[in-house]
Amino acid sequence: MSSADLWEPTHPVLEAAVALSNQLEDNYQTGLVQIRPRDDCHLETPPTIHWILSVDRSDSMRQVGGCGRTRMEMLQDTLQGVLRYLHKAAEEGHVRDQLVSVQAFDSECETICEAV
């Protein structure tokens, strides 16, 4: 992976790195997001974070990829991985409290769960 494939936004408390992997069929890419407290930020109390996950539920998510799975099946696996990661981060004390909201969209947007 080259440095051109790495995106590093700035934040006063958290640091994130998004690394994009090889391009998949239909011009989609997979990636890895790592989020952790910045090394130079020493807080007495870890921050509270509200994650808002936006999920495509349009008809295109029924398309089957080269791996034999639909886009929706791959998305569901990804969401499960994200939730496991967030749970682990909380257990390890990287964040004090986390809220997760999920929104699904096609031609309209609907909140599936809010601040749980």
Image: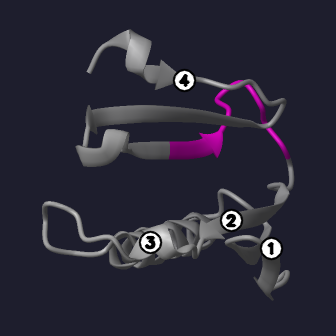
Q: Residue at horizontal 81%, vertical 82%?
A: 111
Tell me which segment is drawn in magenta.
34-43
Real-space CA distance between mark 1 and mark 2, rounded to the nearest whole angstrom? 9 Å
Please name the amino acid that badge 1 sits on: Cys
Q: Are marks 1 and 2 in contact (CB under 8 Å)?
A: yes
Q: Which residue is mark 4?
A: 7
Upstream in the sequence, badge 1 or badge 3?
3
Residue 80 to residue 5: above or below: below
Q: Residues within 10 Å of mark 2 (few under 14, many from 20)?
A: some
Q: In which quarter of the view is residue 47 placed?
A: bottom right
Q: How is the image coloured?
A: one colour
In the image, 64: left or right of 56?
left
Q: Are marks 1 and 3 in contact (CB under 8 Å)?
A: no
Q: In which quarter of the view is residue 80 placed?
A: bottom left
Q: Nearer the viewer, residue 44 or 54?
A: 54
Q: Which residue is mark 2?
A: 54
Q: Residues within 10 Å of mark 3 (few under 14, many from 20)?
A: some
What percent of the width, then of the height, locates residue 27?
A: 35, 39
Q: Main secondary structure of the magenta part?
A: loop
Upstream in the sequence, badge 3 or badge 4?
4
Q: Which residue is mark 3?
A: 61
Per the image, label 1 sits on a secondary structure element best described as strand
Real-space CA distance between mark 2 and mark 3, rounded to the nearest whole angstrom? 14 Å
Please name the amino acid that badge 2 sits on: Ser
Q: Are marks 4 and 2 in contact (CB under 8 Å)?
A: no
Closer to us: mark 4 or mark 2?
A: 2
